[in-house]
Amino acid sequence: MAVRRLGTRGDATTAEALRALLEDPPDPYVAAEALRSLVDLLGVDELGGLLRPLADSGPVLVRAQARRALARRSGGVTEDEQ
């Protein structure tokens, strides 16, 4: 819950802390929420370089979150949203 709140605060200074949770995730659920918060905070366009590799080879929950973000950007629908 705390990780999700960081993204909703609208404070870009939290982005570094959220990115750190992706590099050395303490828990896959925390990492997925960190990515979700980063997308909310910075947007998909700014995170494209980070999202693509995570969508291909990140941990399962992070990979799914990255794919959802990229699909929304392109107007697509992910498998779990069908």
Image (cartoon, grey):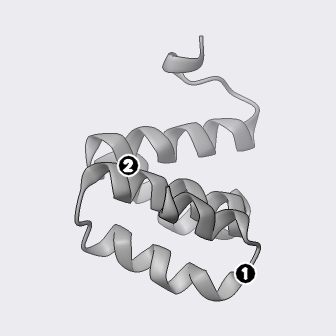
Query: In the image shown, does 32 or 48 lie closer to the viewer?
Result: 32
Q: Position of residue 55 (x, y in %)?
A: 42, 47
Quick check: 74 left or right of 49?
right
Residue 75 picture quarter: top right
Residue lying furthest front: 1
Q: Is residue 7 above or below residue 20?
A: above
Residue at 41%, 51% in the rendered image: 32
Q: Nearer the viewer, residue 4 or 51?
A: 4
- Three-letter amino acid code at disc 1? Asp
Q: For the point 70% across and 83% down, which residue is it? A: 12
Instruction: Specify the quadrant that holds the C terminus.
Output: top right
Query: Residue extending furthest top?
Result: 82
Q: Amino acid at mark 2?
A: Val
Q: Please determine whether, in this image, residue 64 is positioned above or below residue 33.
A: above
Q: Residue at x 42, y 38 (%)?
A: 64
- How many other residues sit within 10 Å of disc 2, few (<14), some (14-19) or many (≥20)? many
x, y (%) of residue 48? Answer: 60, 62
- Residue at which label 1 appears: 11
SS for dot 2 = helix
**Residue 1: x percent and y percent?**
49, 55
66 lies left or right of 30? right
Q: Distance between the Cα atoms at labels 1 and 2?
A: 22 Å
**Label whose residue precedes the other's in the sequence (1 or 2):** 1
Q: Which residue is at 33% across, 49% downward?
A: 29
Find residue 13 and report its image quarter. Answer: bottom right
Where does residue 59 sit, x and y in percent of width and height?
Answer: 26, 49
Residue carrying label 2: 62
**Disc 1 or disc 2, which is closer to the eye?**
1
